[in-house]
Image (cartoon, helix red, strand yellow):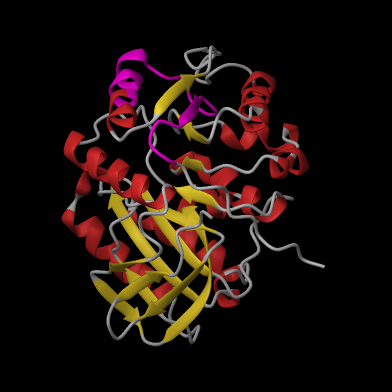
């Protein structure tokens, strides 16, 4: 029998949040900027002693990164876990994680991009809400956007907001649907197909975003998801930002076209362009909670904050 999903406890001002590195190696200067923002919204920080470790392009060995995440979940004084950055590498630690142990000490886990590898298994294997949201050491991120991301996240994690709406730029296909929100970075969701960690798409609202890819590569990923049957199993689909390689206008036009083509004929509502993902305000989305799409109003409504 499927277990009820766990809503982690809400945070309050002054709580201690942990910072770990789970993917690519982190630069100290960019990390410090992010730590300053995190402290500015009222949280104390405990930074992993290994946060600046380096093993070629990775932030330390796979075992060390997995052990740090496990230890931060087990520590009762840490009330939430922020990931320093994405890049590459978090998928390598999946077989080393004990999701049953993670479920024993529920707390918000926040990240995006490559951290998509972890967000969905935490929901499905630990049966705990996770948060697609800002990380700390993001190069080239506009500071004011980063500040807005963290302020929205603070409101979610403290329970200041119970639900919220996001307006998409376009409705690609009509209809309404309600389902559990999941997804993340398009290339990572696509890469998880055929692995033991592939998400369960059945009846879900699938959120997808991406950055720095040519239009044909976006199409190829969507084709893979469609031909695997994943898209047809969803209740609805919502695209966040899909910023093309170099930000080229023609590439952006083709991405919009390909997104419409690969989601056509599924009989489900599809929205394009909410304010989440790379190079946006990246408003945090709780995965594992119910959400509703209404193509007529171009609205995605997150029906609860994800904390209790």
Q: How far across and down, in percent of the image, does residue 197 sit?
A: 69, 50
Identify the residue shown where x is 28% and y is 57%: 275
Identify the residue shown where x is 23% and y is 64%: 253
Identify the residue shown where x is 39% and y is 55%: 209
Task: Give residue 234's quadrant in the image.
Answer: bottom right
For residue 234, above or below residue 159: below
Q: Is residue 39 left or right of residue 49?
A: left
Nearer the observer, 167 or 23: 167
Instruction: State which region is magenta.
Output: 12-35
> Quick check: can you spot residue 194?
no
Q: How far across and down, in percent of the image, does residue 207 sit?
A: 45, 62
Task: Give residue 142's quadrant in the image.
Answer: top left
Q: Quadrant of the N terminus?
A: bottom right
> Quick check: can you spot residue 246?
yes
Q: Report the residue that reaches farthest toward the right.
A: 1
Q: How far across and down, in percent of the image, does residue 146 sit?
A: 26, 38
Q: How far across and down, in percent of the image, does residue 302 sit?
A: 41, 67
**Total marks placed:** 0
For residue 278, above or below residue 292: above
Identify the residue shown where x is 52% and y is 14%: 56
For residue 91, above or below residue 176: above
Q: Is residue 181 magenta-colored?
A: no
Q: Is residue 253 left or right of residue 20?
A: left
Q: Is residue 18 magenta-colored?
A: yes
For residue 187, above or below residue 109: below
């Amino acid at each position: 029998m499927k277990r009820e999903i766990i809503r982690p406890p809400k945070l309050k001002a002054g709580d201690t949040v942990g910072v770990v590195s789970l993917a690519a190696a982190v630069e100290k200067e960019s990390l410090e900027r992010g730590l300053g923002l995190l402290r500015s919204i009222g949280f104390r920080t405990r930074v992993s002693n290994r946060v600046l470790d380096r093993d070629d392009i990775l932030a330390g060995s796979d075992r060390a990164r997995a052990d740090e995440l496990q230890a931060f979940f087990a520590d009762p004084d840490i009330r939430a876990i922020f990931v320093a950055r994405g890049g590459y590498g978090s998928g390598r630690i999946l077989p080393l994680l004990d999701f049953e142990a993670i479920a024993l000490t529920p707390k918000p886990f926040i990240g995006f991009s490559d951290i998509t590898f972890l967000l969905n298994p935490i929901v499905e294997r630990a049966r705990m809400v996770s948060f697609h949201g800002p990380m700390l050491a993001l190069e080239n991120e506009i500071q004011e956007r980063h500040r807005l991301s963290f302020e929205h996240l603070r409101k979610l994690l403290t329970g200041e907001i119970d639900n919220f709406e996001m307006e998409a730029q376009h409705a690609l296909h009509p209809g309404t649907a309600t389902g559990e929100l999941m997804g993340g970075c398009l290339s990572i969701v696509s890469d998880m197909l055929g692995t033991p960690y592939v998400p369960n798409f059945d009846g879900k609202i699938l959120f997808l975003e991406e950055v720095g890819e040519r239009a044909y590569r976006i199409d190829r990923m969507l084709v893979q998801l469609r031909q695997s049957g994943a898209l047809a199993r969803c209740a609805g689909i919502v695209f966040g930002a899909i910023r093309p390689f170099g930000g080229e206008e023609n590439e952006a036009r083709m991405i919009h076209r390909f997104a419409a083509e690969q989601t056509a004929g599924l009989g489900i509502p599809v929205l394009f362009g909410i304010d989440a993902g790379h190079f946006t305000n990246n408003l945090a989305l709780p995965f594992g909670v119910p959400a509703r799409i209404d193509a007529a109003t171009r609205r995605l409504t997150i029906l609860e904050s994800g904390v209790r």
